[in-house]
Image: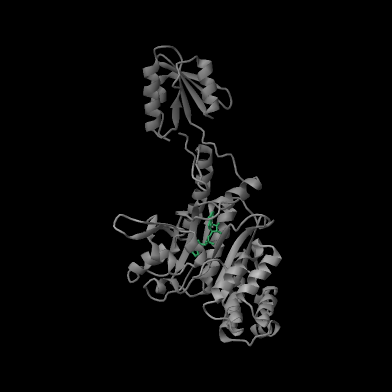
Amino acid sequence: MKFQSVKGTRDFYPDDMRLRNWIVDAWRKVSLRNGFEEFDAPIFEYLDLFTIKSGEEIAEQLFSFTDRGGRDLAIRPEITPSLARMVNARINSLPRPIKWFSIPRCCRAEKPQKGRAREFFQWNIDLIGSDDVLADAECLFVAIDGLRELGLTKDDVVVRFSSRVLLTEVLRNFGVSEEDIPRVMGVIDKRSRLPEDTFEKLLTDTLPDDDARMGTLRFLNMQRIQAEPAESIAAKVGVKVTQPMVEAVGRLRTFHKELQAFGVDDWCCYDTGIVRNLAYYTGIVYEIFDRDESLRAIAGGGRYDNLLEVLGGPKIGATGFGMGDPVLGILLSEKGKIPDLAQPLDFFVIDGTDGTFENVIRTVGALRAKGYSTDFSYKRQSVGKQLKEANRRGARKAAIIRGNMVAVKDLMTGEQEERPVEDLLNVPGK
Ligand code: HAM
């Protein structure tokens, strides 16, 4: 019987693993240099944790199961609810703001497609305990810092941001019920992935009132809102201005100024159509795309001020983002940004004459103990063939053992130096 990997999952052969590690190492390095601390959570949780406030789309994509004790569990589709649960459990002892990051493996039973897998890694940056819009700007700065670390520039990617409050207020003003608002947002979230007539049909289904629909479309077609007073936005859309609208526009303006101060505003642009696919967002939201917009989102995030409270904790402001590895990997490869990730050996130890194999092993053991990456051939073969293997393995040096002598050959320059084996065994540690 022949087995295949499950559709939507990925095998990581060593080449793939090198790429994955390169991305994950950059994420970790950037998180730490921005002052975030690492955390992790279990890979499965009680099902309810993910259904309470994440929204319909994620609930439909859950890998859920019942354990032998009859408990309903699910594999995590994201880590934000686990983060909220963990913070709630220690809320009184954690100094705020809490700046944490994580790189969990997540699973979603999504339709596998380019850049979307059923199992993926997701870099999460979250800042909990600050209502200041600076926290939103800092998290987004970290996302951009991560992309920059991997060699991407503002010509490769674009951040699109908006505020959910504005759209919510527009819909409320048009009399859309609290229950229907997330459904309308769900349709708007899909807009860029749907043919225009399908989008319009779906929008008409969820927003049958003509005035409401036309007004919402007018709002969605507006640009650079952060530069306009709330009153004029409301007038153009055909609704009355509300206090939350005024505040939301003010926050967008501050957000933009702070992105300027961080020196990343030219990576970002305002886009009314960004609403995010998760139900818990409450303020500024953003998504990052490749400039050509040929791929799905690279990252997405925003403010979620109610999630901790909904999950049984206090009302504490929170903001952050998630970035998956699949789209990022595709983009880096398409843009030719993946460097040579080969990990060369420091030494390849070669058996120069029959009968010195024990010396080979002794040398290998000693060099490894000193921190040098060292390997040898499993085949008893000629020096020439062993040298070929050393080259294939990308070794920097070959150590050819002949009795008590060793010839150390620099495989880059071809230079060779003969000395006693003991000398090599006594080299200083790496
Ligand atoms: P999300 O938009 O569902 O947000 O996912 C964020 C990113 O994770 C996406 O932009 C994408 O890069 C990646 N991603 C999601 N699903 C898949 C998939 N099936 N295959 C490949 N990549 C995927 C969240 O998950 C929020 N919890 C992020 C967040 C953290 N918000 C605040 N803090």
Where is residue 156 drawn, in percent x and y? 66, 55
* Residue pictured at 62% horizontal, 86% vertical: 241
Q: Where 55 sits versus 22, above or below?
A: below
Coloring basis for residues: one colour
Q: Quadrant of residue 287?
A: bottom right
Q: Where 168 sits versus 290, above or below?
A: below
Q: Quadrant of residue 74?
A: bottom left
In this view of the protein, which residue sits in the foreground, 79 or 61?
A: 61
* Residue 419 visible in the picture: yes
Where is residue 391 drawn, in percent x and y? 55, 25
Where is residue 402 drawn, in percent x and y? 44, 14
* Residue pictured at 39% horizontal, 12% vertical: 355
Where is residue 229 drawn, in percent x and y? 66, 82
* Residue pictured at 43% horizontal, 58% vertical: 76
Residue closest to the far bottom: 240
* Residue 274 visible in the picture: no
Q: How many marks?
A: 0
In this view of the protein, which residue sits in the foreground, 406 or 227?
A: 227
Q: Where 318 sits versus 7, above or below?
A: below
Q: Is residue 224 left or right of residue 169?
A: right
Residue closest to the far left: 69
Q: Quadrant of residue 245?
A: bottom right
Q: Where 39 sits versus 286, above or below?
A: above
* Residue pictured at 62% horizontal, 45% vertical: 333
- Which quarter of the rendering shows the C terminus? top left
Q: Is residue 236 left or right of residue 276?
A: right
- Which quarter of the rendering shows the N terminus? top left
